[in-house]
Amino acid sequence: MNAHSTTHEELHAEIADKFDTTAMATETTLLNPRFYTTDFDEMDRIDVSPVRADWDKLIAQMKSDPNKGHFKKNAEWNQIDWESMDPPLRREFIDFLVSSCTAEFSGCVLYKEMKRRGNNPDICELFNYMARDEARHAGFINDALREAGVAVNLGFLTKSKKYTYFRPRFIYYATYLSEKIGYARYITIYRHLEANPDQRFHPIFKWFKEWCNDEFSHGEAFALLMKTDPKITETLSARLWIRFFLTAVYATMWVRDHARPEFHKALGVDIDWYDQEVYRKTSEIARQIFPVELDIDHPAWLPTLRKIDAAMRDMEKGTRKGGVGGWVQSKLGAARAGLAFARLFLLPVRKNHVPASPRLEPAY
């Protein structure tokens, strides 16, 4: 027993030496999840009267706290064999967990600040519930990291992470997409592993169904917030910004996922299929509020995403290489990525007829 315990502790020490997860979460790059701040006074002035009936139903659902007892570890968590996990898979899985934890905690910090700074009872109540949910999600993921001896110091992260300022409507676009694409990602993995349980290499995936339903309801809240003011989604400017955020979020997901080939291989998932499936689900859901959607079946869609990915890889190689040669490689990669992104942004889009009521229920 002691020998096994020592081996376990030594393994945790080895993993901790290789993965400074707090530093990974703190780092600000184009691909890493960000912390946001906004004009809280403007948000406090929101009037939800135009969507009152749907709003009250959603708030009642959140208040009932259907996942109150869901995020608790069980005996399976004591059987995780980090020692026999292939090092490339372990590295990518930890990166996935750190990225997910940072994204969830980012939402918690933003929502808690909205609640703290506001006086509007409707807005304060909403963000109190959403901060509660995101705190649970982040803490649960951090439990998985703690099992490997590499938990993120969330308190330090709050103080040291750089914050990005977005106007409220940009917060709506970005956070709505983050919540809905989070639902689509988690439910796609959950359904795949439900059909292929032998590929579930960590028990955390069993929690994804109820978890992603939290993400879904958070997205519903932002859909209702956008519905309170037609200018947020219906003007030409709004349509262009929605198009931009859709392109940026989808492209970021593509590059980030393709940087984790061993993780997806262990799940038994083809990355191209998985990302396209997530885009498809997200696009179908977003018809509830967005008047446009990206044409992910356009012949140039996948080739352009691959160009962005290749350019981003060259940027990273140049940065690691350093010196004049590395600087040139990085800048050329950035230019190629920018041109490919512009190409993706300018692809024809599909127009949607937005329904009078945006409310949806999870259906996948």
Image (tube, grey):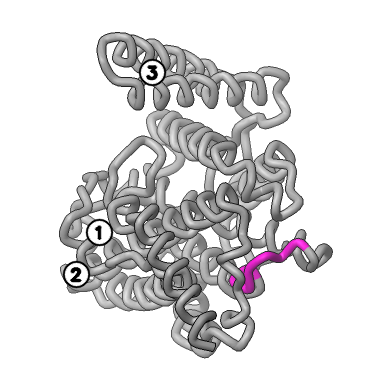
Between disc 3 and disc 1, the foreground one is 3
Give the residue displayed 82% in from the left and 63% down from the top.
196
In this view, 287 is above or below 16? above
Indicate the position of residue 208 as horizontal and vertical percent values.
61, 69
Specify which label sits upstream in the sequence, 1 or 2: 1
Q: Quadrant of the C terminus?
A: bottom right
In this view, 360 is above or below 168? below
Tell me the CA gap for discs 3 and 1. Answer: 35 Å
Q: Are marks 1 and 2 in contact (CB under 8 Å)?
A: yes
Indicate the position of residue 102 as horizontal and vertical percent values.
37, 58
Is residue 208 in view? no
Tell me the CA gap for discs 1 and 2. Answer: 8 Å
Query: Quick one: SS at disc 1?
Result: helix
Tell me the CA gap for discs 2 and 3. Answer: 40 Å
Give the residue displayed 52% in from the left and 33% down from the top.
251
Which residue lies under the disc numbered 3?
A: 334
Residue 306's quadrant in the figure? top right
In this view, 21 is above or below 270? below
Which residue lies under the disc numbered 2?
A: 118
Residue range highlighted in magenta: 199-205
Q: Quadrant of the N terminus?
A: bottom right
